[in-house]
Image: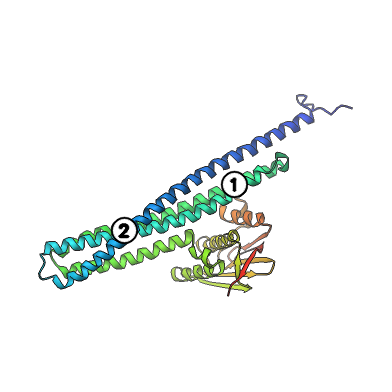
Amino acid sequence: MGEASSTDGGISRKTMNDIIEQNEENLLEIIKNELTTELESRKNELSEIELMLEHRQGEVGKLTERNAAMSANLSQLKGQLENLPRKDILSIYDTAIDVRQRLFEMRGQLEKLHSDQAHLKQYIATLDHVLQTLQSSSPTDFQPAGSIATSESVEMLIQAQEAERQRLSRQMHDGPAQALSNFILQTEIAMRLFAIDQNKAKDELANLKTSATSTFQKVRDFIFELRPMMLDDLGVVPTLKRYVDAFHGRQNVEITLTVTGVERRLEAYLEVMLFRAIQELLGNALKHSQASQVKILVDMGDNDIRVMVEDNGKGFDETIINNRGNMGLRVIKERVEMLGGSFDLESIANQGTTVTFKVPAAELEVLS
């Protein structure tokens, strides 16, 4: 018997399967092309950042030397205040303030560029891994639903990255950027006061120093959130302890971190994933659940790493994880499952939320 034909338009089952297979091939090629374009774009961005880093490092070196020379000049100036014209004194102080301000700004830019570099390298590595996986697969390896899931996973990854960049951009604009504008105004006030009342000028400079110190700490906090350097140097456990301590200082909430098992270094990708997941869950507990108490448990077992984040907040509908708008939880779940782990969420209205996930451990070394 011949193959059965469809009664609607006479399309055979074989023809229909061919159409579906062709659509799968087209979808896979579209995903590959989009990933390749994104990967090349980010690689170009990384090259630009590395060139800027080299340039900024040279500028910081020159400004550091000049700042040291200006500090020496100011020390000598203290014993000559009565002999030098006020105009000369004001000029020297103006130059010193300008040099220190530029050095402060350059160092801030340098730290941000280092963070951007690390962030992009991780993002590029992830994109490259996904692209290589797709390149080594044929369309028959993916069912239609699987192809759609792959597309959504890539979309979630890109959207999550961009959402994080937007959040940090807003924080930088509303915080340090505004503070730097105030620094310029305070500097101008101090410069004018030197010709009128030096004591008031000194008070203004003291206020400027206090503001600069506070802003510098905020910038360091932003850099830590973007890419904590100690994650590479010391590992995920010390970084989490530092992060929780920082939250204690900024938020009116009780946070406890308990680490069980053998503390040790893990593979870099796993440490980043664990830190980002706990960072996201802690942020959700404070901002959305409005919790006053959060408990974090990290169990470093021999074969698995188990994480539990429990809060006493207002809770929410557990089906929210399936909403496209809630990328944070979806990305965590997706990454856990990609690593061969499991993810579980329990939430009760007005009682709190508990998120538990487990991933296979990849041990490097035991911490001393």
Amino acid type of the residue that numbered disc 1 sits on in the rendered structure: Val
Residue at figure coordinates x 65%, y 35% from the top left: 26
- The relative height of residue 159 versus residue 68 in the rendered view (above or below) is above
In this figure, which residue is indicated by the disc labeled 2? 62
- The relative height of residue 217 versus residue 51 in the rendered view (above or below) is below
On the image, the x and y values in percent for residue 202 come to 21, 69
Please identify, in this view, whether the residue under mark 2 or under mark 1 is nearer the observer: 2
Q: Dividing the picture into quarters, in which one does residue 206 lie?
A: bottom left
Left or right of 221 on screen, residue 197: left
Residue at figure coordinates x 54%, y 48% from the top left: 158
Amino acid type of the residue that numbered disc 2 sits on in the rendered structure: Lys
On the image, the x and y values in percent for residue 342 come to 68, 59
Left or right of 316 on screen, residue 44: left
- Image quarter hosting the C terminus: bottom right
In this rendered view, identify the residue nearer to me: 220 or 82.
82
- Image quarter hosting the N terminus: top right
Q: Residues within 10 Å of mark 2 (few under 14, many from 20)?
A: few
In this figure, which residue is indicated by the disc labeled 1? 154
In this rendered view, identify the residue nearer to me: 182 or 91.
91
- CA gap, disc 2 to disc 1? 43 Å
Q: State whether residue 343 appears in this view.
A: yes
